[in-house]
Image: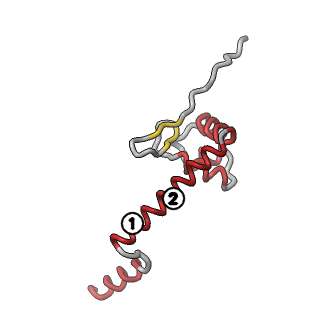
Amino acid sequence: MSVPLTAETLPLQRDQYGTIRVGGTRVTLDTVIHTFNEGADAEEIAEGFPTLSLADIYIVIGYYLRHRQEIDAYLAEREEQAREMRRLDEARFGSQEGIKERLLARRRQQS
């Protein structure tokens, strides 16, 4: 019996916004790596994200472990982009703090 020694294709695609997604799904690389860094193993990640195949998760984790510096830089850039978007949203729409209480108060007034 022969074992094929071929390189696996990396199951990562960059979408039109620059976000890296895993295995042709909407699940982001950020999500998989964050979950892994929080202590989840590949099987637990697969349970939490059933659209991902276990094989793809293992490949992505292996890729991350071999390219940690580059992936961590990408993740830091994504976090900075998210902070900037929150800042722009708050500047445009105001702080959303206390919105639940304001909506509940408005509902009580209407009743």
Q: Earlier in the sequence, mark 2 or mark 1?
A: 2
> In the image, 27: left or right of 6?
left
Dividing the image into 4 quarters, which one contains the N terminus? top right
> At 48% across and 37% down in the image, what residue appears?
13
The amino acid sitting under disc 2 is Glu
- Residue 69 is drawn in which quadrant? top right
Query: Element at badge 2?
Result: helix
Give the labeled residue for mark 2. 80
Residue placed at 55% from the left, 45% from the top? Answer: 29
Label 2 crowd (10 A; few <14 / some 14-19 / many >=20): few
Label at residue 99: none
Mark 1 lies on a secondary structure that is: helix
* Residue 15 x/y as whole percent: 42, 41
Seen at 66% across and 44% down, the residue is 68
The Cα atoms of the two marked residues, 2 and 1, are separated by 12 Å
What percent of the width, then of the height, locates residue 42? 65, 43
Up the image or down, 33 lies above or below 53; here it is below
In the image, residue 86 above or below residue 43? below
Q: Amino acid at mark 1?
A: Leu
Residue, far left: 110
Query: In the rendered structure, are the residues bearing label 2 and label 1 in contact, judged by CB atoms less than 8 Å apart?
Result: no
Q: Which residue corresponds to the image point at 43% horizontal and 67% vertical from the top-left?
A: 87
**Number of numbered discs visible in the structure rendering:** 2
How did the renderer colour the structure?
A: secondary structure
Where is 59 relative to 96, above or below? Answer: above
Residue receiving disc 1: 88
Residue 77 spot, x, y in % from top left: 53, 53
